[in-house]
Image (cartoon, rainbow, N blue to C red):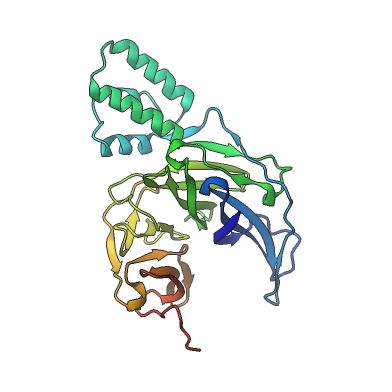
């Protein structure tokens, strides 16, 4: 097994620590048999003197239970139906029977009701039904027992669109304007052929919700959510075109459009593309981010300065 692509966030439990100690959760991409990616967790403490203690890991892994009747956002489904050209009278009738947040059971009931009203289904209706079933399977919830140690919890692929792996989860502790904290992670769902950006949500690392992201800018990899709103809007970095770095702002966490170009590959060590390593970090000087620069023969990781500067250091900086 290989462990890589880490991200780190403050642990939701900061009790029984020294005044300047910080407990953290480290998430890792794990690749096992068949080269299928899953998500693993570790925990530890950063002490006042900057020393790091990583908690002992168990020798076991435990898969979560899957919620049989998960909730979902109606807007996610409506946006995805529109993207696929399936926003028609039949699909609107199905969705209009549902509340802003609904369950799988309620959607199934609405589908049965629509089936009684429409005896003959044309091709658009059949495609809309397939899309709704795909969305239900892609928007799921899972949970671990409180007695399961953090290092024993593993999130394995559930839906068909991530059947070959859940790649590059970038967790961030997001603090909203009401000071409520939620942990989000953008990740890449991969079915062996197509990549699809998805979002994980959790408050406690016991119960997780997986959501489909929508909008014309939801393409390729490298999405990283800012840890707070910017001017009242969600903000995210993305490699929208699989080459350059973009910034997007949105009023809806699940819908993204209008990418604004931030940075193009311009140096010899970033010959092919630019990617994000994680969510931006706010500093007194602005927003700092780490990213990956890819050329034909290597992937180079380095730290970029705060926002407002386009300068960056090559992978072999500082010189030996």
Q: Which quarter of the figure has residue 64?
A: top right
Q: Which quarter of the figure has residue 247?
A: bottom left
Q: Nearer the viewer, residue 33 or 53?
A: 33
> From this viewpoint, is residue 232 visible?
no
Q: In this rendering, would 41 be left or right of 133?
A: right
Q: Is residue 287 above or below residue 215?
A: below
Q: Is residue 121 above or below residue 11?
A: above
Q: Residue at x 29, y 22 (%)?
A: 126
Measured as percent of width and height from the top left, residue 278 is found at: 47, 63
Q: Residue at x 46, y 62 (%)?
A: 279
Q: Residue at x 72, y 46 (%)?
A: 60
Measured as percent of width and height from the top left, residue 206 is found at: 63, 44
Q: Number of labelled discs?
A: 0
Q: In this rendering, would 51 be left or right of 178?
A: right
Measured as percent of width and height from the top left, residue 95 is found at: 34, 27
> From this viewpoint, is residue 146 visible?
yes
Q: Which residue ends up furthest to the bottom in the rendered image?
A: 320
Look at the image and tell me in which quarter the N terminus lies: bottom right
Q: In this rendering, would 117 be left or right of 314?
A: left
């Amino acid at each position: 097994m290989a462990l890589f692509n880490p991200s780190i966030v403050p642990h939701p439990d900061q009790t029984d620590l020294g005044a300047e100690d910080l407990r953290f959760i480290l998430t890792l991409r794990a690749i096992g048999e068949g080269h299928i990616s899953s998500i693993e967790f570790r925990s530890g403490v950063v002490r006042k003197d900057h020393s790091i203690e990583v908690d002992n890991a168990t020798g076991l892994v435990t898969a979560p239970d899957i919620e049989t009747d998960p909730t979902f956002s109606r807007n996610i489904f409506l946006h995805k139906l529109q993207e696929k050209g399936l926003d028609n009278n039949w699909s609107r009738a199905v969705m209009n029977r549902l509340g802003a947040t609904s369950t799988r059971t309620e959607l199934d009931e609405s589908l049965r009701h629509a089936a009684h009203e429409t005896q003959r289904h044309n091709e658009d209706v059949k495609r809309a039904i397939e899309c709704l079933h795909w969305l239900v399977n892609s928007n799921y919830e899972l949970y671990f027992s409180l007695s399961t140690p953090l290092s024993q919890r593993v999130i394995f692929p559930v839906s068909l669109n991530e059947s070959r792996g859940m790649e590059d989860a970038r967790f961030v502790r997001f603090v909203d304007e009401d000071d409520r904290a939620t942990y989000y992670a953008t990740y890449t769902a991969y079915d062996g052929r197509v990549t699809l950006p998805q979002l994980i949500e959790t408050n406690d690392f016991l119960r997780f919700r997986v959501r489909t992201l929508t909008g014309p800018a939801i393409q390729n990899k490298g999405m990283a959510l800012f840890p707070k709103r910017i001017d009242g809007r969600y903000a995210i970095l993305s490699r929208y075109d699989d080459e350059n770095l973009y910034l997007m702002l949105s009023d809806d966490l699940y819908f993204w459009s209008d990418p604004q170009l931030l940075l193009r590959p311009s140096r010899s060590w970033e010959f092919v593309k630019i990617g994000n390593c994680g969510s931006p970090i706010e500093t007194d000087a602005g927003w700092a981010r780490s990213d990956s620069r890819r050329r034909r023969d290597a992937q180079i990781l380095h730290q970029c300065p705060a926002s407002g500067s386009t300068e960056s250091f090559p992978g072999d900086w500082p010189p030996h």
